Image (spheres, rainbow, N blue to C red):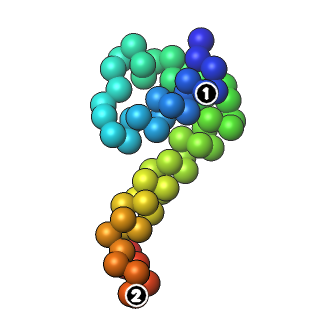
Amino acid sequence: MLNCKEATRLISESQERELSLLEKMPLKFHVMMCSGCKNFSEQVPFLSQAMRAFAKWDGNEPPRK
């Protein structure tokens, strides 16, 4: 069984690469049982999108959606 540190690492990595089946299954089980990791998994896509928008921002005007 994964601990929260391992689960959050996999959740973060899933934004950059496809997880293997051996990574996905224990992660899904952990997220079903852990409300903190479930919340994290729901917020990561938004955070990734916000970071990409910020990286494109030139600092002169508000970032675009």
Earlier along the polypeptide chain: callout 1 or callout 2? 1
Q: How many marks?
A: 2
Please name the residue that numbered disc 2 is placed on.
Answer: 61
Residue at the spot 43% in from the left edge and 84% down from the top edge: 62
Please name the residue that numbered disc 1 is placed on.
Answer: 5
Give the amino acid at mark 1: Lys
The percent coordinates of residue 39 (x first, y second) are: 62, 44
Location of the N terminus by quadrant is top right
The percent coordinates of residue 31 (x first, y second) are: 59, 29
Residue 51 picture quarter: bottom left
**In this orientation, which residue lies closer to the viewer: 58 or 47?**
58
Location of the C terminus by quadrant is bottom left
Dot 2 lies on which element? loop
Q: Is residue 40 above or below residue 26?
A: below
The percent coordinates of residue 36 (x first, y second) are: 68, 37
**In this orientation, which residue lies closer to the viewer: 13 or 55?**
55
Q: Residue furthest front?
A: 59
Residue at the spot 43% in from the left edge and 53% down from the top edge: 48
